[in-house]
Image: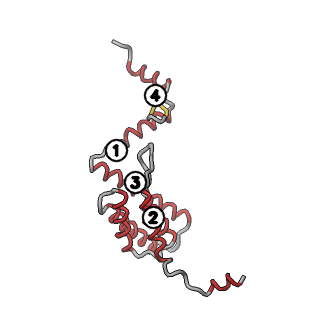
Amino acid sequence: GPLALKRFGQEPNRFAGYVPAATVVLASLLAALPIVSTSGWFPDFGYLALISWRLLRADPWPAWWAAPLGLVNDLFTGYPIGFSIALWSATMLALDLIDRRTMWRDYWIEWMVATVLIALDEWLHWQVASLSGADVPFINIAAARALSDRGLATRSHEGWDITPEGSAVLARRAGPPL
């Protein structure tokens, strides 16, 4: 109707350019919610929002926005001050470089770029946690996963439980009692 025709000649809302930054800040604030996780892991929602918006639209994102948004993320998530600032700035620079080097990007390239960036983010989180003295049981998880794939252990609410098949294998390896 007449309302739809009226919208075509209007400019976008003057605050529309700030919507991506505001949603990244709101996503960073999710870390302040009392989320209970049995695994102790949840993604960096602010970083996910940053990547999502940046891959969707590059034009409203000046590269310098990464530093203040990263600082907000560091303050609300408890990461060491400077971690998100450096990571997000490097991410924005890498995405700018990818934009300049590729003539076009399709859906699969976008997903691959996001996958690599998220994996790098999580790996860096593990490295920082390890350097700060946290127990990072990656090897234990990998071993338990290998046992469960072979049917020797199962995942329960308390942790990993040895199955009867796993107990039999352990008994055979232990040998006869002395």
Front position among marks 2 and 4: 2
Which amino acid does the dot numbered 1 rest on? Answer: Val
> How many angstroms separate mark 1 from mark 2 (CA)?
28 Å
Residue 74: percent from the left, percent from the top? 34, 61
> How many angstroms separate mark 1 from mark 4 (CA)?
22 Å
Under circle 3, the secondary element is helix
Q: Is residue 43 above or below residue 61?
A: above
Which amino acid does the dot numbered 2 rest on? Answer: Leu
Residue that label 4 marks: 162
Q: Earlier in the sequence, mark 1 or mark 4?
A: 1
Under circle 2, the secondary element is helix
Front position among marks 3 and 2: 2
> Any mark on residue 122, and which?
3
* Image point (42%, 20%), residue name: 171
Q: Earlier in the sequence, mark 3 or mark 2?
A: 2
Residue 118: percent from the left, percent from the top? 44, 58
> Any mark on residue 26, and which?
2
Q: Residues within 10 Å of mark 3 (few under 14, many from 20)?
A: some
Q: Quadrant of the C terminus?
A: top left
Q: Is residue 40 above or below residue 47?
A: above
Which amino acid does the dot numbered 3 rest on? Answer: Glu
> Any mark on residue 136, and which?
1
